[in-house]
Amino acid sequence: MKAIVYERNGDASVLQLVERPIPEPGPGEVLVRMAVSGVNPTDWKARHVRPLPAGWQIPHQDGAGVIEAVGEGVDQILIGARVWLWEAAWQRPWGTAAEYTVVPVRHAVRLGSASFDLGAALGIPFMTAHRCLTAGEFMPDKLHAGALSGHVVLVQGGAGAVGNAAIQLARWADACVIATVSGPEKAQLAAAAGASHVINYREQDVVEEVRKIAPDGVHTIVEVSAARNAADDVQLLRAGGAVCVYADDGGDEVTLPIRPLMLPNARWQFVLIYTAPKAAKAQAVVDVSAAVAQGAVRVGEEAGLPLHHYSLAATAAAHKAVESSMVGKVLITTSET
Ligand SMILES: NC(=O)c1ccc[n+]([C@@H]2O[C@H](COP(=O)([O-])OP(=O)(O)OC[C@H]3O[C@@H](n4cnc5c(N)ncnc54)[C@H](OP(=O)(O)O)[C@@H]3O)[C@@H](O)[C@H]2O)c1
């Protein structure tokens, strides 16, 4: 099979297109013929710093394809199933940037008739968004239509991949969604994703605008840049509200005023999807799959997430695009499945 492999950390030039034997699924694993591999910021960050215990790494956590074989203990009925993959490369060398990969069976989730492009966009962004929408004190453990009715959610960075997923999932769950963006094109994307209100944080006063919409404050803030937005977030939480911080974009330290956060019993919840509670991730898989089956989450410009396709051989260019914050979703077509 063709695969992208790197054998040392470094810039995108370490990514090599090579021929490798098709892997055998071990006990509890499935072999997946990949159709599309999804690229996330975590993939280029890992390429720079994460150790390579096997001495080599096929990158990318997310992807979609068809189960071609199963290992010992896995039901044969899964052969032929269209699936989306999550955390394929977390503490394993078998990422999705290849014609085939192997994953533990619970990391291969039925995709039904949804597109492989959507399947490859789900894992990291949608599971992170799900965690951010369910971790707060007010929030339900499960998302479904109606689960967030009466809730106000603020998504800081609504045109990002995680921001887009948070908007789509929160709208599916019937929340009132407010999103912030840096300019008019991103405003259109956040609105297309389903945000009820979009605020340009460069031109408008976010606190003033959110208060007009939600005078009592918001239940949850999905936060990409706590270092820049903490002062606003503190003023915008309603009693018992939560700020769910999933990234350190724009700065990696934050200063918080204690008493203004004690008073409303506010919660700051830090989120890293890899180490999030197992039960929360299992629920995210169930809920995201339900949203897909109901046609409630989509990809493409009309869903606020423009797609950018690359070939497997162009994976280095795809990494550079994500590293330079290309707007939308970067996908690698791994085969013509
Ligand atoms: N913790 C986890 O488990 C987890 C999971 C997924 C991703 N992440 C991390 O989350 C970050 C975003 O990932 P992504 O895939 O969504 O990237 P992305 O598609 O590049 O989106 C990032 C978005 O954040 C916006 N942004 C940056 N500073 C902002 C600010 N001060 N206020 C509001 N919006 C701001 C950017 O737009 P503007 O700059 O134009 O505003 C951009 O739309 C990355 O650092 C990634 O590594 C973490």
Image: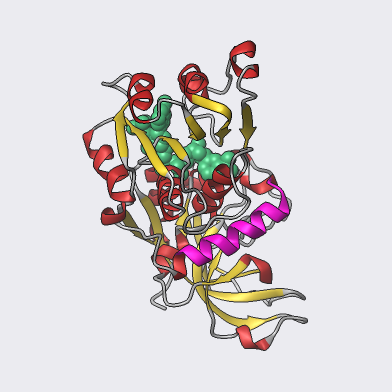
Q: Please provide percent x and percent y for residue 323.
A: 43, 40
Query: Residue 149 versus residue 98: which sits nearer the camera?
Result: 149
Colour setting = secondary structure
Residue with the most extreme left position: 184
Q: Residue at x 49, y 68 (%)?
A: 64
On screen, residue 327 versus residue 32, left or right, reads left
Tell me the quarter of the picture where residue 243 sits.
top right
On screen, residue 66 versus residue 93, left or right, reads left
Q: Please provide percent x and percent y for residue 32.
A: 57, 75
Tell me the quarter of the picture where residue 81 sits.
bottom right
- Number of numbered discs present? 0
- Residue 27 painted magenta: no
Q: Residue at x 40, y 58 (%)?
A: 331
Q: Please provide percent x and percent y for residue 322.
A: 41, 44
Q: Please provide percent x and percent y for residue 334.
A: 44, 68
Q: Residue at x 63, y 65 (%)?
A: 107
**Which quadrant does the C terminus fall into?**
bottom left
Query: Residue 260 versus residue 256: which sits nearer the camera?
Result: 260
Query: Residue 243 versus residue 32: which sits nearer the camera?
Result: 243
Magenta region, residue range: 276-291
Magenta segment's dominant SS is helix
Q: Can the viewer see residue 90 in this picture?
A: no
Q: Can the viewer see residue 232 in this picture?
A: yes
Decide: is 122 above or below 234: below
Decide: is 256 above or below 107: above
Q: Residue at x 38, y 53 (%)?
A: 330
- Residue 281 painted magenta: yes
